[in-house]
Amino acid sequence: MLLAPQGPRPAPSADNARVVREGRARRLDWFELAVLAVFAAVSVWVLALDIRHAIGTGLVWTGGDGFWADDFQYMAWVQDAARHVLVSNLYVLRSTPHDYFQPAIVISGGLSALGVAPWLSLLLWKPVAVVGAFYAIRGYVYRSLPGRGARRAALVLALFFGSFTVVYGAVQTIGDLFPGFLAWGYPFALLALAAMAGGLALYDRARTNGSLTWWPGVLGAAASFLHPWNGALLIAAVLGGELIIFRRGPRMWARMVQPALTVVMTALPLGYYLLLSRADISWGLARGASKHVYPFWPIMLELAPLLLPALVVYRERPRTFLSAATRVWPVAAIALFAFSASRFGATPVHAFQGVTVPLSVLAVQGARRLGFGRLPHPAVWASVLVAAFTIPATVSQLEIARRMVRPLVGNANFVLKAEHRALQFLARDPRPGSVISRIYLGQLVPAETGRQTFLGSCLWSQPSCAGRTVTVRKFFTGQLSRVAVRWLIASQHVRFLLTDCRQTSRPDTLYPHLVVAVHRFGCATVYEVD
């Protein structure tokens, strides 16, 4: 997708010419194949644990690939996209507009409309994200560094780096800084990282060749749609990189076409999200519900082993766009973290997802500047250091995941067979109508059945998720007044009540005037109400 040339091709420096020449695409060597295999193995760790628990306990696995509720939110989006293309909020009973567009969700929705289960159509993005992220990061490293050893070190650090820090008094590693963590239920964040790294590498290639291409803008738009933080970081890296290496000269305005094209295409989805949060009350409330404070210095402490050698490189003026953008990326992540922690943003730690990519390149460059290569047996020392800052952190993340995915009470990744049969009944029943249940199964109702639920996700069951939780508890224990019960059922168009296997109350006994039919599936029950 190359367009007309922008003028005379720039003459790259000798170092950059060497990097570009050596960085041309070629097949993976044995080392890179091994790294890809390990990265793929890490990405399926939670999936393997889920399958093992399902086989060993006799529980039904619901398709969740992480240990938070985000998977079920994505499945609910897929259910809605299969019917309407654009997505509404199924975690409330009020009518909400179908106005959310996300390209990967639309594709998964199309597959589900053809008969593929929503959890499977979502899970199919995992291999795409893992392979895409590996190749994009490999391409980024190849265009940034010459030499096989340096590239191998940077690639491994970018994918597996981690260092222990202290968060709220606990010694641990931070999941968002570990790319493998994103493969556990966050395939869109990993895809966005791949799009960002690949977009910057392709932008640098076009700039070096003196050509104009749509691809950086296309990948930037994809990053913004999939994970807006990566889109914002790409814009900052492009503008910052161009500003740092800006030179006056002939055809100066022509040289501004590529950055303008890339920035505008990347910014359009961000503008759409901004409009969505203003025009759709569900998105505005969800952004407010996701606001939280995350400590900044534990992040810096974990990144310190990369930051310290990287700081050496900041003393030098970069001579290529990609080297300038690599310096801008970590600084932009800090600025985006501060913005996201303010009243204008949310979930600040997402700003640092993928920051190990530029920091690994800078750290390897900094180690060279410090004379690391003059040490006796530098390859041995490099291998030891890379292993020290990748293997323990990876093991720690795997252990955290192992503890988090256990089938404990409230973990909706697993349900009893009776509960699964009740959900299947709701999915097959052709009659419209929403559902009231406790939050344990409420988060599964939209994902499994495509129906609206009164309580299921404290991000989307707004306003007052806490108040809804209390209301549901009082409803199922008979503590609500007759007027309140009538309002809840009639005004919210509720047709079904769903009780899980841990509930002891019986709505047909509490509300005999409302319940018109009872469908029992062992210890789980679906009640139809008038």
Image (cartoon, rainbow, N blue to C red):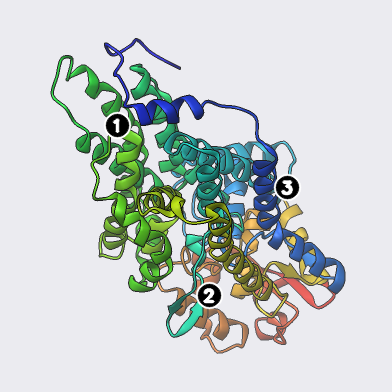
Q: Is residue 85 visible?
A: no
State the residue position of label 3. Answer: 117
Camera-nearest residue between 189 and 327: 327
State the residue position of label 2. Answer: 486
Instruction: Give residue 515's quadrant in the image.
Output: bottom right
Q: Amino acid at mark 1?
A: Val
At 61% from the left and 75% from the top, the residue drawn is 438
| Quarter of the image with the N terminus in it | top left
Q: Earlier in the sequence, mark 1 or mark 2?
A: 1
Q: Amino acid at mark 3?
A: Ala
- Say which element carries label 3: loop
Residue 416 position within the rendered picture, expressed as x and y whole percent measured from the top left? 79, 72
Camera-nearest residue between 399 and 346: 399
Above or below 58: residue 209: above
> Relative to residue 236, is residue 447 drawn left or right?
right
Mark 1: few, some, or many residues within 10 Å (few <14, many ≥20)?
some
Q: Mark number for residue 298?
A: none
- Say which element carries label 1: helix
State the residue position of label 1. Answer: 264
Instruction: Give residue 107's quadrant in the image.
Output: top right
Q: Earlier in the sequence, mark 2 or mark 3?
A: 3
Mark 3: few, some, or many residues within 10 Å (few <14, many ≥20)?
some
Task: Report the Cα–Cα distance between label 1 and label 2.
Answer: 51 Å
- Which of the two discs, 3 and 1, sits closer to the camera? 1
Contact check, label 2 and label 3, Cβ < 8 Å: no
